Amino acid sequence: MTLAFRNHIDVRLSVADQVIAGVDIQPRTRPPLRRLFAGKPAETLLATLPRLFSLCAGAHQVALISALEAARGQQPSSLTHHRRIKAVINERFVEMLRGLLLGPLAGDRGTTQSAQRLLQAVASLQGASGAAEPALQRVETLSQIKIGLSALGIGLEAELVLPGTPLASLMAASRTAADEGWKPISSEHGVLSAVDDADVVARLAEPDSAFAELPDLDGRVPETGVWARHAVHRAHRAAGPLERLSARVAEIAALARWIEAGEAEDEASDDRLVAGFAMGPGRGAGVVECARGRLYHVVELDAEGAIARFDYLAPTEWNFHPRGPVATSLIGARLRDAADHAAVEAMVGAFDACVGCRLVVREMADA
């Protein structure tokens, strides 16, 4: 299946007197899945998801399965629920590492070979997440992952960033860049969490709703993703590129420790990671906390069990909303020199859109 749609985001900055005075975000065009899959068997949509979403494909599948089960009045066993959480967390680990290696660390040539070996190891781990993995193979895979993380500079013990590594150099450069003055998460945004799930799925399920295109909760456009998960448990003075990078590294290390410990069963009881919501006969929603934030799927089935309506809401629609966290974070930031430009690019990259993102700077004096 080939779909033609605008699969990138434009972030246009208007600069006056070396300060960002305006941010215009042109969102991506979402694929018309509601129209394409209406009347088709649910299994067709489930099988197509990996081709539609190259990033976090597993999370999309888990969200849809959870929504379908809720619509059919089914309840997964505790073992099944745990396996899905394991798959989602393994994928989150892979996606966050990939984002770090292809983003902030992409310019470090010394990481190329170790990064490739590390991604191969985590891909092997991800491929085994739904099946029993031989003990010896698992030990070898985990050993390769730990060696790869250490080479990058991610420590799993008391020291989070190991000295003399590419990550340590990146963190030092971030400290000397224009990283001061970034605003904390504004109260007008807050963070998207499980507390919001009922409101979000209710809005997403409204007939002919445009909520998935430009979501908001009574005017509020909350942030979701790594920093939101991090900030829920901590009070922060700033939310700049350095703090966001630190939060990403801390979560990668935490996920690695969780995987090494054998994916403790008690994690399966955490409904914030994977959840389903029954919304009446033939209607259900699935929610997954994936790498980039909270992902929502809503389905409605007809009398024959085919798709009558389907919609989804990805984390990117919140973070890159025209009135969302990216836009408000950049307003007022300095843009004087190369260091400031790098800090602004790092700030946009810290939100890790699930599609390509283009940054355009326009001096208002030239208008």
Image (spheres, helix red, strand yellow):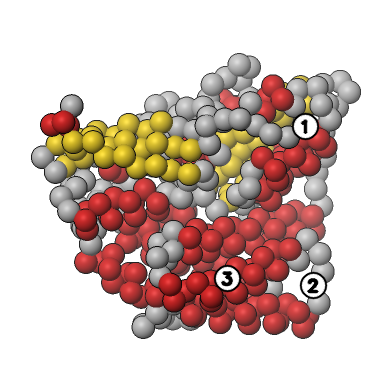
Image quarter for residue 98? bottom right
Kind of residue indicated by mark 2: Glu
**Residue 221 seen in this snapshot:** no
Give the answer, above or below, for where 26 lies relative to 247: above
Can you tell which mark lies on residue 116? Answer: 3
Marks 2 and 1, Cα distance to the nearest angstrom?
32 Å
Q: Which residue is mark 1?
A: 71
Judging from the image, what secondary structure is the residue with disc 1 in?
helix
Could you tell me which residue is drawn at 51 percent across and 43 percent down? Answer: 355
The quadrant the C terminus occupies is top left
Could you tell me which residue is drawn at 39 percent across and 27 percent down? Answer: 219
Q: Which residue is mark 2?
A: 133
Residue located farthest toward the left when viewing the structure as drawn: 17
Judging from the image, what secondary structure is the residue with disc 2 in?
loop
Marks 3 and 2, Cα distance to the nearest angstrom?
22 Å
The x and y percentages for residue 244 are 37, 58
The x and y percentages for residue 314 are 56, 39
Crowdedness near tag 2: few (<14), some (14–19) or many (≥20) residues, C-alpha within 10 Å = few
Judging from the image, what secondary structure is the residue with disc 3 in?
helix
N-terminal label among 3 and 1: 1
Give the answer, above or below, for where 114 lies relative to 297: below
Task: From the viewer's perspective, tell me whether residue 104 is left or right of residue 316.
Answer: left
Kind of residue indicated by mark 1: Ala
Kind of residue indicated by mark 3: Gln
Image quarter for residue 235? bottom left
The x and y percentages for residue 6 are 52, 32
N-terminal label among 2 and 1: 1
Could you tell me which residue is drawn at 61 percent across and 38 percent down? Answer: 296
